[in-house]
Amino acid sequence: MIKTILSATGEPIFHLTAGDASYVISVFHGFLLHLYAGPAISDDDVEYLLVRVGHDSVVPRPAHTPEGWFSCDIAPFEYPAYGSGDFRPSAVMAKMLTNDQIDGTVEITGGAPTTAVMYESHEILAGKPILDTCPAIHAADDECATLVLHCTDPATALKYDLYYTVMRDYPAVCRRTVIKNTSKNTSATLLRAYSASLDFTTVDPQAELVHLWGTWGRERHMERTPLLHGSMSVNSRRGASSHYHNPFAALVTSKTTEESGMAVGMSLIYSGNFDITADVDAFGLTRLMAGISPDGFEWHLDPGAQFVTPEAVIVLSGEGLGKMSRVYHKLYRKHLCRGEWADRERPILVNNWEATYFNFDDEKLVAIAEDAAKCGIEMLVMDDGWFGIRNDDRSSLGDWFVNEDKIRCGLGKLVEKVNALGLKFGIWFEPEMISPVSKLYEAHPEWALKTTGRPMSISRSQYVLDMTREDVRDYLFDTISGVLSSANIEYVKWDFNRNLTEAGSALLPAERGGEIFHRYVLGLYDLLDRLTTAFPHILLEGCSSGGGRFDPAMLYYSPQFWTSDDTDAMERLDIQLGTSFVYPASSMSCHVSASPNHQTGRVTSFVTRGNVAMAGAFGYELDLTKLTDDEKDLIRKQTADYHRYYDIINRGDLYRLILPTDNYNGKTGKCASWMYVSEDKSEALFTFVVIRTSVHPVYFVKLRGLDPNAIYVDQTTGKEYHGDTLMNAGLNLTKNYRDGDSVVIHLIKK
Ligand code: DGJ
């Protein structure tokens, strides 16, 4: 998987093979240059790809390279450092705090953040070393190999280890950087420390960026935009990965489609402030980099200390965005999600939030569970409002004690009653928060994040706990464990409903003020680690006012995430199809809710609400006791169908056929369509939804991913088609649909 040859300068060229992709790095007078990333190539020495244009006087040349054509200003770097002639955005910027001597020979220039990352040596390891900090991809020793490039800054005591893990069965390269201060008596400060950077020498002149933007209730809408000269950044400074941008972007060419062309995905396994920047320079070289956002970031490195960046996962597809997504789906499902529930069939749940909001008691919950049991639903989730004195969102966060005015029979008894109906029981927490009106705040006002002397901004009537503090995490571990051990609880929904402001901690020394956001995230991971280790059988579902922290790092702990608070089926088409650019169906929690929809007021049929929610971890979010018998019959059908289709949807390959944003062929209304194909191509599930119809619309949809030579049978009509007919001629779906109508076709190979 990792081959080394020597270049003309006698330095190594590394050819990494990841699945059917190549990634080539060369060392050139100590600089680490990026030569190629994309579909597999057979040559190792591709230094000829370096751009050798004539330079004008404003382009500096390094002092030690004899080649007149070489300039850092145009070289494609692996980990670009600030300050020595590469004027593009840098991946790393560091300074030593005081003048000092290293081994009595080199004098550090005291405070200037000029940084260099020069190759010293390398190691090739079987497997993937564990660097215990942030969540990361896991794989057995024979499933991957790791190249470690040991680099140094010759003028300081800082050392840089660049880790590249290549996956045997996936065109994916996982990158992290470890920065060490090897000085015995001098501290250093990191001002930028990205996880990965890639400089493309050979991109189509018109590179484009695909990314996922959004806001509350409108998460992860896919946007594709041409890159112009200069930088474009998607990022978060909110303390969480956020509703606004997802830590993902893909570099594509103007010609890339779902099925063809280059697509390089960059996905950061991180839940806090991040930045993904794409930069196009004057010569068309395109840089794509990902890491912790440098805004407000300043990491103090004591003598002997090291900093480990989060992991960035680069997926290299030569067959369009569809293949890139399918690689992320399988990789994240099998090598990122962990624990008993990682790939296990999830229970179909009913959550009481949109059924009751805060207005419920034990009897209401049991009534919902009784109807759920009759309809094939397998778990009841008790959402917000069961603890403290919480009858609206203005109090009690932090007081994780059962409110026995609402749960009059007690939690243990309630769970027994639900279990007796044949249902599992799940519960909601929002661990990282504290209400100013709570017993916890009365006892520990200093546990909330704040900056001394500044008023604290309030959001949803709550403050954020200082997760950097061990005593806070111990309190949360003890109180949450107490609840989880008190009854047969098999699922937890972990919510997070505001972002971080005036972020400061009473316990952090002044020189560490710039560490608060990252330390917050590390504190969160520590608590999640402790709880998932103590309660391995519990299925954890992440949530953040819907999908405000739907990121790869959270999937490491919670293999499913509440996709959005917007449960309107039409709105969900954009949200779910956007989410599918990176995240597997099994990670997207999707529920059938009431109509008219509570967020949009839109009326959609029960059938279509079910067909759309079946694109992920399926459930219900409505008052079952208020449904008609016909609707309950439909639930029985939907729950049975979901079991039948579980494997195809959650473990099959997704093909996005029509995105709601596509300008479908002009003869039709607005629609969306997607399909799943089982890994062995023996079954497929096709879904088509009309968002807004038109007069006499004409709809043809070509299927993908089937075996062209096989015969597939439509399980509803019995009609037989060859795979090649379905893929090349397509289905004729022309009919006079109403807005919100949908069609699902289950095909089985004959
Ligand atoms: C936001 C979540 O996204 C909702 O599903 C619900 O759990 C509420 N919080 C409860 O406050």
Image (cartoon, rainbow, N blue to C red):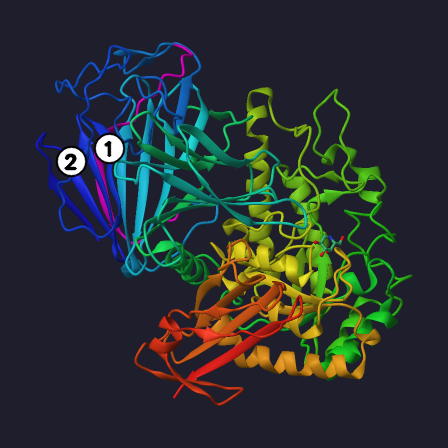
Q: Amino acid at mark 2?
A: Glu
The x, y position of residue 194, in whole percent, is 42, 34
Residue at left 84%, top 46%?
Answer: 395
The foreground one among 515 and 378 is: 378
The foreground one among 577 and 500 is: 577
Can residue 126 be found in the magenta stretch? yes
Can residue 443 be found in the magenta stretch? no
- Compared to 637, does 14 lie above or below? above
Residue at left 36%, top 77%?
Answer: 725
Quick check: 571 left or right of 79? right
Mark 2 touches mark 1? (CB < 8 Å): yes
Earlier-in-chain disc, 2 versus 1: 1
The x, y position of residue 544, in whole percent, is 66, 49
Residues rendered magenta in the picture: 110-130
Image quadrant assignment for residue 672: bottom right
- Compared to 694, does 217 lie above or below? above
Whether the residue under disc 1 has CB within 8 Å of ligand 1: no
| Residue 421 seen | no
Element type at marker 2? Answer: helix
Quick check: 587 left or right of 254? right
The x, y position of residue 614, in whole percent, is 59, 70
Element type at marker 1? Answer: strand
In the image, which disc is placed on residue 33?
1
In the image, which disc is placed on residue 47?
2
Query: How busy is the neighbourhood of tag 2: few (under 14 within 10 Å), some, or many (20 plus)?
Result: some
Could you give the CA–CA distance between mark 2 and mark 1, rounded to whole angstroms? Answer: 9 Å
Q: Amino acid at mark 1?
A: Leu
Whether the residue under disc 2 has CB within 8 Å of ligand 1: no
Query: How busy is the neighbourhood of tag 1: few (under 14 within 10 Å), some, or many (20 plus)?
Result: many
Residue at left 27%, top 34%?
Answer: 150
The x, y position of residue 140, in whole percent, is 33, 60
